[in-house]
Image (spheres, rainbow, N blue to C red):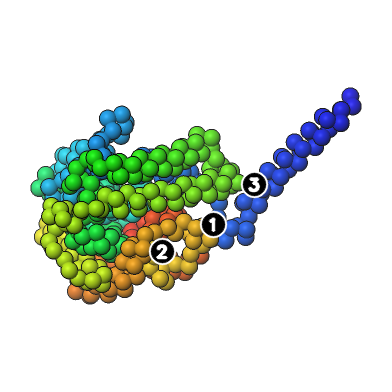
Amino acid sequence: MRLSPRAQRFLAILCGSLFAVAAAEIACRIDAFFPGAHFEPESARHYFEARAIPQAALQMHAYARPDAHLSEADALPYVHPFAGWTNASTDEYAAQMARDTASADDGFFDLLLIGGSVAGNLTVAGAPRLVQLLEADPRLRGSSVRVWSFARPSYRAPQPLAWVQWLLVLGARPDAVLSIDGFNEVAMALENSRRGLHPAYPSFRYWSGLVRGSASDPAVLDSIADVRLARRVQMAIARRALELGFHRSALLTRLTQARLRAAKRVTDEASSRLLEVHDLGAHRDVTLRGPPFAGDDRAAVELAIASWESAARALHVLCAERRIPSLQVVQPTLADAGSKRASSDEIRNQTTTPEWAEGVAIGYPVLRERARALAAAGLPVVDATRIFAEVEETRFVDVVHFDERGNFAIAEWIAPRLLARLP
């Protein structure tokens, strides 16, 4: 049967469209077209999953009354007397760890992981490889490695230290402690000090809202609404991509990543406006700001590093006197010049605040120097800031967090150094 001219045009357009889509899919799988941004379905899936969960939106509840309709209500932050803030899930998790690790001869090797969001991400994406490498060591054969993560977004060195102390008080007995930190110390020092907070205090982004209570000022409420909407858009894009299996297609993955990057820029801009309006009057709140600090930017960063160094020494003593092996890792960041040759994807994703970038530029050379001095003095501190220096492919999803391969790589780098601390 002969097709009508209209049907022929439709068929030609359809075939041409399918050919164009297929060609685009093939092109998106060719690494040469996307330097340093190799497509892997599993990496794409993890990328979408990290942006589909509501964790990124939970910070909003530090500024507003908790949302009773949020199914993840147990993850909402509230003030903790020692660690700055916690949530119901973490408190229950702490009690569980105390119960499950009380016995030394239970067939488990219990690793306590502390730090900020980078350590938290490692728990999900890198811990399985870390566990595999630890369990392969002859000293741990017959034992199952359990990772207990008390790493939380924006935590700074005194906060994880407080968690270790509190867990020991509750009766927890880990077999080893792994700390991954460094970035938050220097990045948030300037953000705090420029808003009138002590440079070594907990991050302004959480601390200010939790201490000052729920917002009532119209400008703050408007900004909260903007941030909440922007973050819901991000989550919706990522969840839709997961539901439809976009991670199996290089073309759809790259298109979705571009949408997520654009949505993140909107979110970052809204978050910055929220911090600005919520900042008004903060310098007059003695409960929020902490002790007076009159130093310049460099003094603020160096004070935060001194806080980090003090916490590192205290963690070592706390663990050593109980014969608990420990390891403290100074994490890499793209904001640190020379840490890595950024791929095209990393360049696009490298969004950061001026305070964070300046804090890293001032602080990381000093941080490396202090880490070397601590290691020379016999403390279990290792410098991982250059582990990606020779890597050209993508390893970071933003200025500080790793993709799946980055988490895998840092787990492999940490494992032998942690094992070296075991008796």
Assign a secondary structure to mark 3. Answer: helix
Q: Return the mark for residue 46.
A: none
- Tell me which numbered mark, 1 or 2, is placed earlier along the sequence: 1
State the image quarter where residue 101 is shown: top left
Residue ranking furthest to the top: 1
Q: Which mark is residue 25?
A: 3
Residue linked to disc 1: 37
- Pointers 1 and 2 in contact (CB under 8 A)? no
Q: Is residue 206 above or below residue 326?
A: above
Mark 3 is on which residue type? Glu
Question: Splitting the image into 4 quarters, where does residue 182 fall?
Answer: bottom left
Q: Could you classify mark 2 by the number of other residues whose Cα lies within 10 Å: few (under 14), some (14-19), or many (20 or more)?
A: many
Q: Position of residue 323 (x, y in %)?
A: 14, 58
Disc 2 marks a residue whose amino acid type is Leu
Say if 71 sits above or below 375 in the image. above
The label shown at residue 334 is: 2
Residue 276: percent from left, percent from top: 30, 53
**Between 355 and 117, the one nearer to me in the picture:** 355
